[in-house]
Image (tube, rainbow, N blue to C red):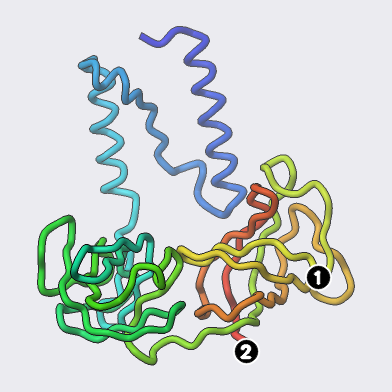
Amino acid sequence: QVDAGEAAAMERAEREIRALLDAHGYPGGTTPVIRVSALRALEGVPRWIGTIEALLDAVDTVVPTPERQPGESFLLPVDHALPRAGEGSVISGTIERGTVRSGDRVQVVGPDVEMAVAGLEVFGRPLTRAEAGDPVALLLRGVPHAVLRRGDLAAAPGSLTPRRRFTAHVHVLPGARGGRAEPFATGYRPEFFLRTTHVLGAINPPGARAARPGDTLTLGVELSRATPVQPDLRFVIRDGGRTVGAGTVLTIEG
């Protein structure tokens, strides 16, 4: 059973969650909030087992199925790169769009190497084809592990053009939510986390004014090295171990 103190704490937590959803444009008043205890469910307490089932039902009912893009050109952000003795290297990650088959040629943007896929696995099972949404591992024969790293992109050859400058719609997190306490102006250089890579970039707020904590605005970004980006790509801005903002790419400038 839940005592009065625990019940009050859960009530406060639910109110805060609903307020946070409302603040970000989601329906906080109607979104299901399921109170669960995984520990007590594992201990076999019937009430808490029932809450886990209710949570899964809510996910199936409310959370939309992500839109896949199997018909687009292949793109895989690399999560891990590992050597495979005597065979080459393996890269793994979740396919963002398109499909890939054993034997297809792919280009790894980063080291900028191109080769045929010698084999692929999904959930540890060898397959001949994988598509958008699948967590996949690709075997690349003859590619030394040393040239591959997390943050590279495997893609259909010629389908990606690295860029350095873009405009973005950005929300600057206030200090109360773990962000900055001070505004920043042109030339501020935090890290941008795009897909599985991160790169330094300079921020240029509009006009001469500074961007203040809590602002939502459109600003310019210039990355320290060219990276494949496209409109609608989401990213996170971090500085000194803190997440200080989040945004979406609007237009590519070069």
The residue at the far bottom in this view is: 158
| Mark 2, residue position | 254
Residue in view at x 35 percent, y 23 percent: 37
The location of residue 40, given as percent across then percent down, is 30, 17
Residue in view at x 15 percent, y 56 percent: 124
The location of residue 86, given as percent across then percent down, is 19, 68
Give the quadrant of residue 97. Answer: bottom left
The answer to which of 7 and 95 lies nearer the viewer is 95
| Mark 1, residue position | 187
**Circle 1 Cα neighbour tier, 10 Å, few/some/many (<14 / 14–19 / ≥20):** few
The answer to which of 176 and 223 lies nearer the viewer is 223
| Residue type, mark 2 in image | Gly
**Is 86 above or below relative to 105?**
above
Image side of residue 232 versus residue 124, left or right: right
The location of residue 226, given as percent across then percent down, is 58, 81
The answer to which of 10 and 80 lies nearer the viewer is 80
| Residue type, mark 1 in image | Gly
Residue in view at x 56 percent, y 54 percent: 25
Q: In this figure, what is the number of numbered marks?
A: 2
Name the quadrant of the N terminus: top left
Image side of residue 114 versus residue 221, left or right: left
Q: Secondary structure at mark 2?
A: loop
Name the quadrant of the C terminus: bottom right
**Is 191 above or below relative to 128?**
above
Q: Secondary structure at mark 1?
A: loop
